[in-house]
Image (tube, helix red, strand yellow):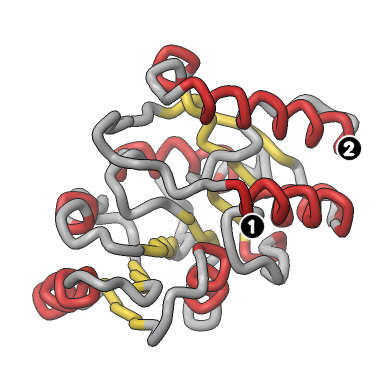
Amino acid sequence: MLKGKRISVIIPAYNEEKCLPGVLERIPDFVDEVIVVDDGSSDRTYEAARAFAEKDSRIKAIKLEGNCGKGCAMREGVKSFTGDVVVFMDADGQHKPEDIIKLLGPIVNGEADVVIGARKVEEAGKRPLHRRLSNIITTRLIRLKLKTYVYDTQSGFRAFRREFLPEIESDRYEVETEMLFKTAKMGARIREIPVSMIYDPNRAGRFGARDVLRFVKAYLKF
C-alpha cells in the first residue's frame, strides 16, 4: 500500500496533556515513527508523551526547556526524523490520525510532493468569526503571491516527501506560510486532499495580534 516508504509523524505540542493521548492512541499501525515535541508546556504534556513512548517503541518524546513556538518545535522534530515521507499534525485533536493515509496516497503514487489536508468548508465554518476572517485574508494574499489556487493555505496537517521538506526558519504560526512558499519555489507538486476537522469551541485560540505581524513578515521575506 505504501510501496515500502517509511512514514514519520511529527507532532508539536503545547499544553496538550488532555488531548495528546487521544491522538497518539489512534496513530495508524503503518506509521513507522512518531516524534512528539513538547514546546515548553506548563502541564504534563511531556509526561503523557513519555508514557506512550514506554509502551510503543515508535514514539519518541522530546522536551524543549522553554516555549519557543510551533515552528521552533517542528524544526526540532525535523532534526531526528528518518522517514521517506513526513507528516505534520497538531496535538489538540483537531486532526484525525485516521486521515493520515489520505495525505500519503498522492505522494506514494508519485502524483505529488507535498499534500495539504484541506479542512472542509462545513467544518471550518464552526470556527469563530475572527478566525475565519483572518484565514480568508491570509489565504487570498498567499494565493496572490503563489499565482496558483490553494484552498487551505493555513492547514497544519501536511505531508512532505523528504526531498521537498524545506528548512524551517520561522518560530511560530507563520511557519505554515513559510513552508508553502518555499516548497513552491522548489518546484514541488502541491496537492490538497479534503480532511475533517474537529473544532472545540470551548478552547481559546492561540493566534493573536503578534502572529498577524509575523505572518506579514514571512509573507514579505519568503
Image quarter of residue 140: top right
x then y, percent, for residue 48: 15, 70
Q: On the picture, is 138 further left or further right than 64?
A: right
Q: Vertically, is 125 above or below 101?
A: above
* Amino acid under disc 2: Lys
Image quarter of residue 60: bottom left
Q: CA distance from mark 1 to mark 2?
A: 16 Å
Task: Identify the image quadrant of the C terminus.
Answer: bottom right
Give the residue number, with chain letter if any, for mark 2. Answer: 145
Give the farthest residue toward the bottom.
Answer: 65
Give the farthest residue toward the front.
Answer: 209
Give the residue number, with chain letter if any, for mark 1. Answer: 175
Task: Identify the image quadrant of the N terminus.
Answer: top left
> Residue 96 shows which numbered tag?
none
Element carrying mark 1: helix
Of residues 16 and 99, the one nearer the viewer is: 16
Classed neighbour count for the residue bearing mark 1: other residues with Cα under 10 Å, few (<14), some (14–19), many (≥20) = many
Q: On the picture, is 78 further left or further right than 102?
A: right
Image quarter of residue 97: top left
Of residues 152 and 161, the one nearer the viewer is: 152
Residue beneath the point at 63% across and 65% down:
162
Q: On the picture, is 68 further left or further right than 133?
A: left
* Amino acid under disc 1: Val
Tell me if label 1 and label 2 are in contact, CB under 8 Å: no
x then y, percent, for residue 99: 36, 37
x then y, percent, for residue 170: 67, 66
Residue beneath the point at 37% across and 27% down:
196
